[in-house]
Image (spheres, grey):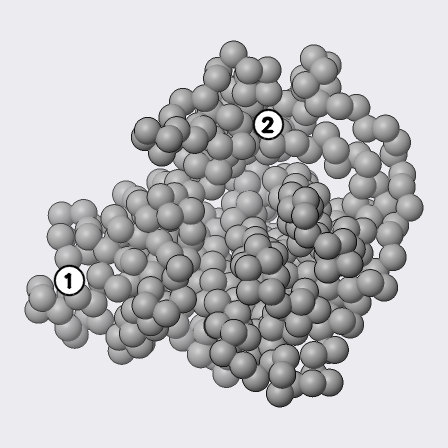
């Protein structure tokens, strides 16, 4: 096992990998609650119950899709990256496709399945890997830093430190609020531990925050330890039903837009996450991500598996960076995450203590670690600084990793051509330029 995952070469061990895997799981465990709530349109009160997805079935599908996806990523690509149904993609699935477009969730799952199959074919052909390796190293660093700012922003929001402000868009929250103070405590304890060089600082900080939260009544104690596993029957295999009437349910402009959006967002969210987390873990070889093809194949297959089980697109999780910060360097940590997701099926009540104030400090601190890649960008070269800056700043401001990548990648060939650096531009970057322009023209609403 140690030889397969190259523990010695990467300077890691079982303890670090297990702690890293547990940290990643704790940082992304919220998806087990948030995804079923989102896909069942729980917040929409007037929506007919018969048109909603079954909460229990989606919970099981979420856990199984995350477990299978993480297992494939760990065993095939050997990356310390976990997978689960993606945030943003699930919101698009529920609130845009189902609620706004009026597409039945059963047909929407078919769209996810088709997008997944296309991804698998692109990954097997090596086209996705070529695109990732064609991205200039400067922009790869910008993507990593941008994702760091993005997840830190999410953490500040979850903690209640940054809140909505109608006059200035965002503002400082109520720092006297109990749960906000709990997050501040979590940030403080994690920062102190990291400053002292404790590898498991992020994990210890989350555990300490949860314990303090329960002591002061800010987090409810779990009512029970073990609960029954809900049935998967309401969603399993439903994605195939639309193929019985493809002319009406599949081959139409609306479904084409749905599939293209799933393709675009999942493609570049995954690309950005793989590059950012691999760079943080020190796995990049110059400008090339080793085994990128295997990582993209595992990610693609997880989308297909998730669609069959009954959930929105599964993708690589930026929260994996929390596990890397805790010491994870290999796919063994992803296997640990997979095991935890399987166990969560039986111990779901215990996950009630993993609340936003507990995960927020981890996201904020990891954001601090990820923006360190800014130092590798040649800021004195304006043709590089402009697309890099736009990539970094657009992610938190647009609340989208994919949009940040798109803006930066549109500007890169423009500034490089004007500067007379056409020979430094990989041909695939021109193709991406056209793709991203089409994205802004036809898909962004």
* 272 lies above or below 361: below
Classify mark 2: residues with Cα within 10 Å, few (<14), some (14-19) or many (20+).
many
Would residue 345 be visible to someone looking at this image?
yes
Left or right side of 160 for 226: right
Nearest the viewer among 438 and 365 is 438
* 71 lies above or below 211: below
Which residue was labeled with disc 1?
415
Left or right side of 105 for 251: left
Which secondary structure lies at badge 2? helix
Residue 113's spot in the image, x, y percent? Answer: 64, 73
Residue 323's spot in the image, x, y percent? Answer: 58, 43
- Quarter of the image that includes the C terminus: bottom left
* Location of residue 134 by image quarter: bottom left
Residue 123's spot in the image, x, y percent? Answer: 52, 76
* 243 lies above or below 261: below
Which residue was labeled with disc 2?
357
Total marks shown come to 2
Residue 444's spot in the image, x, y percent? Answer: 39, 61
Would residue 68 be visible to someone looking at this image?
no
The residue depicted at 76 percent of the width and 54 percent of the height is 49
The residue depicted at 56 percent of the width and 47 percent of the height is 320
Which secondary structure lies at badge 1? helix
* 230 lies above or below 135: above
- Quarter of the image that includes the N terminus: bottom right
The residue depicted at 66 percent of the width and 72 percent of the height is 107
Disc 2/disc 1 C-alpha distance (Å): 42 Å
Q: Report the residue that reaches farthest toward the front.
A: 46
Left or right side of 236 for 29: left
* Location of residue 96 by image quarter: bottom right
């Amino acid at each position: 096992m140690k030889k397969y995952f190259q523990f010695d070469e990467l300077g890691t061990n079982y303890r670090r990998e297990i702690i890293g895997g547990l940290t990643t799981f704790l940082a992304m465990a919220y998806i087990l609650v948030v995804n079923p709530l989102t896909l069942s349109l729980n917040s929409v009160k007037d929506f007919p119950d018969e048109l909603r997805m079954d909460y229990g079935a989606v919970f099981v599908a979420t856990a199984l899709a995350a477990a299978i996806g993480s297992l494939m990523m760990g065993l095939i690509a050997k990356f310390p990256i976990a997978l689960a149904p993606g945030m943003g993609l699930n919101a698009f699935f529920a609130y845009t496709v189902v609620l706004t477009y009026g597409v039945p969730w059963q047909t929407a799952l078919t769209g996810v399945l088709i997008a997944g199959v296309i991804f698998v074919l692109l990954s097997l052909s090596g086209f996705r890997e070529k695109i990732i390796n064609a991205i200039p190293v400067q922009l790869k660093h910008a993507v990593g830093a941008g994702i760091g700012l993005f997840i830190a922003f999410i953490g500040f929001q979850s903690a209640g430190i940054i809140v909505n402000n109608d006059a200035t868009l965002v503002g400082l929250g109520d720092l006297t609020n109990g749960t906000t103070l709990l997050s501040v405590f979590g940030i403080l304890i994690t920062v102190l531990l990291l400053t002292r060089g404790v590898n498991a600082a992020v994990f210890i900080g989350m555990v300490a925050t949860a314990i303090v939260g329960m002591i002061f009544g800010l987090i409810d104690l779990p009512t029970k330890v073990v609960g029954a596993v809900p049935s998967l029957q309401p969603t399993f295999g439903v994605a195939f039903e639309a193929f019985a009437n493809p002319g009406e349910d599949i081959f139409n402009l609306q479904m084409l837009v749905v599939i293209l959006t799933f393709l675009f967002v999942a493609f570049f969210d995954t690309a950005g996450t793989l590059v950012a987390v691999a760079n943080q873990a020190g796995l990049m070889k110059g400008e090339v991500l080793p085994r990128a093809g295997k990582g993209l194949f595992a990610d693609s297959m997880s989308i297909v598996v998730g669609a069959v089980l009954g959930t929105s697109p599964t993708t690589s999780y930026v929260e994996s960076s929390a596990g890397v910060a805790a010491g994870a360097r290999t796919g063994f940590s992803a296997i640990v995450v997979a095991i935890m997701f399987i166990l969560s099926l039986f111990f779901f009540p215990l996950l009630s203590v993993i609340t936003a104030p507990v995960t927020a400090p981890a996201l904020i601190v990891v954001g601090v670690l990820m923006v360190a890649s800014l130092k590798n960008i040649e800021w004195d070269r304006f043709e590089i600084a402009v697309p890099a800056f736009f990539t970094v700043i657009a992610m938190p401001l647009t609340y989208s990793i994919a949009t940040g990548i798109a803006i930066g990648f549109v500007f890169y060939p423009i500034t490089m051509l004007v500067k007379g650096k056409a020979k430094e531009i990989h041909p695939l970057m021109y193709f991406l330029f056209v793709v991203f322009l089409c994205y802004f023209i036809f898909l962004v609403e």
